[in-house]
């Protein structure tokens, strides 16, 4: 992802030695995201080549990070394919690079599938449900730091950069989401640790098989339904510049049906899926507006286009009543 902190080869090599990961042979900055500094690190140990990812955290602090790292380690111990953080001789999985918090985790096999079909969406839906079930026993608690309170704080900051029509949509939607959050159905939503950012580029496939989820650094305790909505809004829409944000029905049903087969949705979840789809679109529209108009300097920074999620949000508002068709019992059958 973006490179804010330039890590010297010798410094990375020293860290790998403390983790018993052998001798560093390659250090390569990763382009693609905007939150943290990430490097691919390759090392040699006992004749074997090892591949990991070094992350230097730019916004999260030492107090917040144990939740994310221990959640990943917990999920790995439960058989969920996620990158496992590497510990030093004292068992520490949170490290320091240039005075900033850092972690080294396994590099998953394969590559992201940016043009997923029904089969990929089924695999993601089933694995997401497995992850939610496993995570219910995770003992640590930390809220979703990009949830409703953050939306309420950030909307006034980005409003001056918008057209009148965009500002009207943003004000109306944040008011709607605050209204939904005060209702009994929202209070009844099943909750637990969620990924909260499971886009297509945060999952890996090899030979058509899902090899795991990664980048858990937006995770937090929130409704499972919000996690589902974030996935649907990325995995099941078109991503060309001419799209109108509509959901693709076959992929949406595949993801929801596979999820439902592992963890059946509650009545409250069925009732609020249209609202949470709107919430997921709002969350990423706000954050992309913030990243575009209030950027930080980075060697490889490439802000995402906010207009994509503006179109997705407009489509979710337009289709709110029609989205209930996705939740029919006969529709939610795995292929």
Image: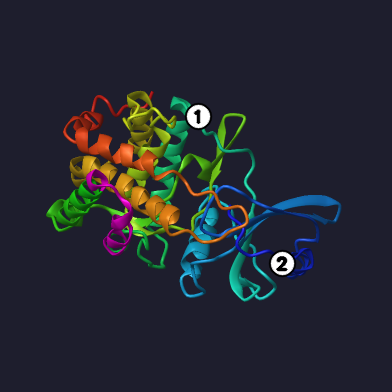
Rounded to the nearest angstrom, the CA distance separating label 2 from label 1 is 36 Å
Task: Determine whether, in the image, residue 2 is placed left or right of residue 121.
Answer: right
Q: Is residue 161 magenta?
A: yes
Q: Position of residue 82 (x, y in %)?
A: 55, 50
Q: Tags 2 and 1 in contact by the CB under 8 Å rule?
A: no
Residue 188 can be seen in this image: no
Q: Which residues are magenta?
A: 152-166
Displayed quadrant of residue 278: top left
Q: Position of residue 321 (x, y in %)?
A: 16, 33
Q: Quadrant of the C terminus?
A: top left
Q: Is residue 308 above or below residue 171?
A: above
User: Which residue is nearer to you in this view: 201 or 51?
Assistant: 201
Q: Position of residue 87 (x, y in %)?
A: 65, 67
* Secondary structure of the residue carrying numbered label 1: loop
Tag in front: 2 or 1: 1
Which residue: 60% across, 67% down? Answer: 102
Which residue: 25% across, 30% down? Answer: 326
Q: Is residue 211 above or below residue 84?
A: above
User: Which residue is nearer to you in this view: 328 or 158?
Assistant: 158
Q: Position of residue 224 (x, y in %)?
A: 32, 50
* Secondary structure of the residue carrying numbered label 2: loop
Q: Is residue 188 magenta?
A: no
* Residue at which label 2 appears: 19
User: Which residue is nearer to you in this view: 225 or 302?
Assistant: 302
Task: Determine whether, in the image, residue 253 is placed left or right of residue 100.
Answer: left
* Residue at which label 1 appears: 115
Q: Residue furthest right?
A: 47
Which residue: 21% across, 38% down? Answer: 317
User: Which residue is nearer to you in this view: 124 or 117?
Assistant: 117
Q: Give neighbour class at mark 2: few <14, some 14-19, many 20+ (Cα, 10 Å).
A: some
Q: Earlier in the sequence, mark 2 or mark 1?
A: 2
Would you say the magenta stretch is mainly helix, strand or loop? Answer: helix
């Amino acid at each position: 992802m973006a490179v804010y902190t330039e890590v010297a080869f010798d410094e990375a090599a020293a860290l790998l030695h403390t983790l018993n990961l052998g001798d560093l042979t390659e250090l390569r900055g990763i382009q693609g995201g905007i939150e943290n500094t990430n490097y691919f690190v390759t090392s040699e140990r006992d004749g074997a080549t090892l591949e990991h990812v070094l992350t230097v955290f730019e916004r999260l602090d030492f107090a917040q990070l144990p939740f994310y790292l221990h959640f990943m380690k917990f999920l790995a111990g439960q058989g969920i394919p996620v990158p496992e953080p590497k510990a030093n001789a004292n068992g520490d999985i949170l490290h320091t690079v240039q005075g900033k918090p850092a972690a080294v985790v396994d590099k998953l096999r394969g590559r992201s599938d940016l043009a997923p079909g029904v089969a990929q969406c089924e695999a993601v839906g089933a694995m997401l449900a497995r992850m939610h079930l496993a995570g219910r026993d995770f003992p640590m608690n930390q809220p979703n730091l990009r949830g409703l309170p953050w939306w309420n704080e950030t909307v006034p900051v980005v409003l001056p950069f918008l057209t009148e029509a965009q500002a009207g949509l943003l004000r109306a939607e944040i008011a709607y989401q605050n209204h939904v959050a005060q209702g009994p159905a929202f209070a009844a939503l099943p909750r637990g640790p969620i990924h909260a950012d499971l886009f297509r580029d945060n999952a890996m496939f090899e030979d058509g098989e899902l090899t795991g989820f990664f980048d858990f650094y937006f995770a937090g305790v929130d409704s499972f339904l919000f996690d589902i909505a974030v996935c649907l809004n990325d995995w099941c829409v078109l991503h060309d510049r001419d799209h109108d944000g509509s959901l693709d029905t076959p992929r949406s049903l595949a993801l929801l049906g596979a999820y439902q087969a592992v963890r059946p949705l509650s009545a409250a979840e069925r009732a609020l899926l249209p609202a949470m789809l709107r919430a997921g679109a709002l969350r990423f529209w706000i954050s992309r507006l913030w990243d575009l108009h209030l950027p930080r300097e980075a060697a490889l920074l490439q802000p995402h286009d906010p207009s994509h999620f503006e179109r997705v949000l407009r489509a979710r508002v337009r289709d709110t009543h029609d989205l209930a068709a996705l939740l029919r019992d006969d529709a939610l059958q795995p292929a």
